[in-house]
Amino acid sequence: MPEEHAAGLDARPYDALLLLSFGGPEGPDDVVPFLENVTKGRGIPKERLKEVGQHYFLFGGVSPINEQNRALLDALRKDFADHGLDLPVYWGNRNWAPYLTDTLREMVTDGHRRILVLATSAYASYSGCRQYRENLADSLAALEAEGLELPKIDKLRHYFNHPGFVRPMIDGVLKSLAELPEGVRDGAHIAFTTHSIPTAAADGSGPVEAHGDGGAYVKQHLDVARLIADAVREETGVDHPWQLVYQSRSGAPHIPWLEPDICDHLDERKGAGVPAVVMAPIGFVSDHMEVLYDLDTEAKAKAEEIGLPVRRSATVGADPRFAAAVRELIVERAASESGAAVTPCALGALGASHDLCPVGCCPARALRPAAAGADSPYA
């Protein structure tokens, strides 16, 4: 029996972990109500939401994100049990059942008072971090109104450059390259993809000192892309050209968003004589709808139309190495909270991200209360 298992790992002062995700519909009747939750307050007509929902209807109205989260829950619980980490794991969503407020209420009722949050978003941005923290604050306010004793909530640091997140993506790119025909494999380019966001949101991502020209959002993605490309070169002996590109734009046409779009990039690569492309979705934890539709459906259709061989590498999903990374992040954070000296585990040039989101981190146009940060009203 491993020594750490025999002794057990210490998560104190924390007594529970919350897996916090976006949520998604589980059937055709859920699609429009789900999209109403996502776009609440924007005044988007129901008929427009039905049009947007066509992506989901192509897959029976079911988002894969829920099953992906169930698989991740199983992987986390197994890893914790195998390594003697006594920490219950709960799951709550921002936009669909199980809803965040309901899950937090359950956790409080079960007696938990120091909760760590794992968000299914690895990078800094408003939509990938602060909005999750705002939703946490909304839920805490709802529980406070019910007269419940509020827990103290902390959020695990951004894990974009943790080895347990990066290594599975390296292996995914290597596998995709190996699946390409031998005649085009060595000349293949790698398109590292992530969710496009407004350039203003990108410029304001991360702590204040990181703001400007893509902010922490772009810097973090570029750092991960370099790590993967360097590892691929070291393990194959081939230096594959690469570029960070974007997908899943959903904003008004007059508002600048990060570019180039993956489909435009495939057109450009074909025109430049590139023989093949591997699409590597480094911005996503799992194969949810935007990966299945924007890459596996739309981008692959574009590639077929222009005669460009492509492969799409896997996301991290419920890979056991990612589950192990979460365990390591929990133990790291618990030790830090207990006053122990901690050496964070991080690859690349940027180092480990902050434990506590500072004031001015990833602001929106109108600041709302946000939990698990230096400006939290629920410290």
Image (spheres, rainbow, N blue to C red):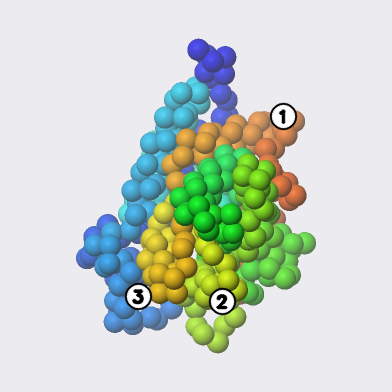
Residue at (66% x, 45% y) in the render: 237
Q: Secondary structure at mark 3?
A: helix
Q: Amino acid at mark 2?
A: Gly
* Left or right position of 376 against 54: right
Q: Is residue 11 above or below residue 136?
A: above
> Residue sitting at 74 percent across and 62 percent down?
210
* Residue that sits furthest to the left in the current view: 29
Q: Label 1, on which residue?
A: 340
Q: CA distance from mark 3 to mark 2?
A: 31 Å
The residue positioned 72% from the left and 29% from the top of the image is 340
User: Which label is found at residue 52?
Assistant: 3
Q: Residues within 10 Å of mark 1 (few under 14, many from 20)?
A: few
Q: Which residue is mark 2?
A: 271
Foreground pick, 312 / 150: 312
Q: Amino acid at mark 3?
A: Val
Residue 290 location in percent, x, y?
42, 63
